[in-house]
Image (cartoon, rainbow, N blue to C red):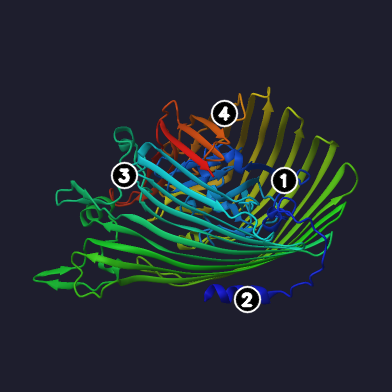
Amino acid sequence: MKLVHFFIFGLLLIQAPPLIAQQQQDSLSTISLQEVQVQGLRAEKDTPVTFSNLTKEELAVRNLGQDIPILLNYLPGVVTTSDAGAGIGYTGIRVRGSDATRINITINGIPYNDAESQGTYWVNLPDVASSIQSFQLQRGVGTSTNGPGAFGASLNLETDFMSADAFAEIASSAGSFNTQKNTFRFSTGLLKNHFVFSGRLSKINSEGYIDRASSNLNGYTFQMAYKDEKRLLKGVFFGGHEITYQAWYGLDTETLKNERTYNPAGEIYDNQGVTSDYYDNQVDNYAQDHFQFHWKEFLSDAWTFSLGLNYTHGRGFYEEYNDLWYNQNISFGSNTNFDYLQLSPYRLGNQTINTTENVTKKWLDNDYYVTTVGLQYDIEKIKLNIGGLYSSYDGDHFGELVWAQMAGNVLPRHHFYESNSIKRETSGFSKLNYLISEKWNAYVDLQLRHISYKTNGTLNGPRDFNVNESFTFFNPKLGLTYKTSENQRWYGSYAKAQREPNRTDYENGDPKPETLHDFELGLRKETEQIKWQANLYWMQYKDQLVLTGALDEVGYPIRENVGKSRRIGIEIDAKIKFSPLWLWQPNVALSQNKNLDFKFQRDGNIENLGATNLSYSPSIVAGNAFIFAPSTTFQIGLLSKYVGKQYMGNIDSENSVLDAYFTSDLNATYLFQKLSWAKEVQFSLLINNIFNTLYESNGYFYTYDDDWSVAGQIKTIEGAGFYPQAGINFLVGIRVLF
């Protein structure tokens, strides 16, 4: 009923314009469903924005089960990582040193970033890459999008175009770490010249490179479309269910050297402090379903109206065993204490019981509603997009005591914290591309956002957690494009972005909103043999929320405001055809990423460290691909990635360094066509990290003050953890199209 009410609400939110009959060609190829979903959000060749496109065909050769961040690894300025070490399960992406909370993700124009954390969790959409038609990665602020302002990049995904021809497809792959992926896709083709139905079902299993870092993933996509001469209607239903064994604890330096794949999650200790076993259900268990409806109405040759509706329901938990000996002797944690669990101490003989080993589940149950509306005007010299968004998020957070060794009289499924969050957003944008002359194009993009965020209840601890904040942001973007020839364009732009803190920021302090001023200057050139672009950027921040390197108890990065900071860089990427057989695709990103006048308290004294390196921001990121295609049916490619040294904290401590690394993958495909029993059969091979490089692409860094070892003295202690990535590993696959 929630979904029905939501769709009714979305339709009542606006007054639908009159339907004006215009003659349109009756063809899915001419009425592109791309325009239904992403028109007005994507950059084009005359848009003064730095961007890269990736098509379904380009992605398909490597799509053998790894998550979207890993598949995007070779785009300019991109750094990726995997908790399980093999690219399946929990994976992450950074662009220009900005983490996923600053990368604005939209799927068919609908925001995908979690409303509270602002992060993206691709593990919740297993194998969604098999249902994606194309990607566009906009680096920097980018064009107006729905959702929070992009501080590092915007990533726009569009689901599959609807096929006019019926088909069925089966794809299976298998490889290292007992990884298996099975996918079934189908389309009815065009029915009665108006209707198309298509779908996908996927199943992925992997044991992971890290011990017990298993993934059990199920995903789906179903699409329904109706078209006639003047309108397109499309329903998209997609989602998934993931069960992953936790692998977000990382390893200290010593363990990394001696036992690289060790996973401390779920450790059970005996009374002597020896690990006797591991809790077998130390898992993250979460399901997420998305329901989208898109309506495109062709009002005239110049005017087009669009409406998008979305309902997302997410629910799940992570389960955790809390060991008493470990808390009392190693971590000195509180999650085995009765006050943490909201239990009453009791007497047992002559002893007061106020601690216990236990198993907890920490739940999240949320609903997310979105309505988007847009009006597009397109004539020879003017492209105008006017749009708006209303969204509402309602999330329940609560902790459940599943088992306790010594709990006394406690009700089953006892809740030891409860919190509710409501976040609402109203935003609008107006975007104009104006052709001043044959050579000059002006770009104006104005966005106004209003956000309210409220929480009430408690956090585990226990701690009261009550937030009542609202923000109004005006985000302008201005730019010019100068066309020196049909194949060459210069562009320059200025953009301002502002965004609110996320939930974790409020849990760990009193954060301020961030502000970014982004200046871009670039050149794009395209000929028959070479396509390349180069751009300079200057990103100036105020009150940037940067990663401290520390993690909270669920492995989520902790951030803090750092005053003024900046990113300056140059990015170059190209596609070069040496011959019909050879393609070379290099890219490099060089940057300087600095905190300005950074202050840090060490040994009880405030120190001004001056200009320090921003965390997780390597000064060089480079990618390269050599592709050899001697025929239309065979292709082999060598893909390489270099990521320079980076700090996990902001104080330039050598203890916080992630070393530079260089990896290479080998990818090959062979295609059989027009067989007697199938339209085509494709075999694929992917060998990751062919030189067996041992490296870490992510980690965490923390400090704390020891004020108890020596009376009257404070000593700042540093620590770090690392997430090792797999050495050489492989995936092989077969795809059959009927």
> Measuring 84% from the left and 59% from the top, which residue is drawn there?
301
Residue 81: mark in rendering: none
Quadrant of the snapshot with the C terminus? top right
Q: Is residue 446 visible?
A: yes
On the picture, is 439 further left or further right than 56? right
Amino acid type at circle 4 is Phe
User: How dense is the environment of label 4, judged by Cα within 10 Å: few (below 14), some, or many (20 and up)?
Assistant: some
- Residue 502 x/y as whole percent: 53, 60
- Residue 327 x/y as whole percent: 25, 55
555 or 545, nearer to the observer: 555
Q: Secondary structure under badge 1?
A: loop
- Spatial CA distance of label 1 from label 4 is 35 Å
According to the picture, the residue beneath numbered tag 1 turns out to be 49
**Viewer-nearest of discs 4 and 2:** 4
**Viewer-nearest of discs 3 and 4:** 4
According to the picture, the residue beneath numbered tag 3 turns out to be 263
> Measuring 41% from the left and 30% from the top, which residue is drawn there?
728
Q: Secondary structure under badge 2?
A: helix
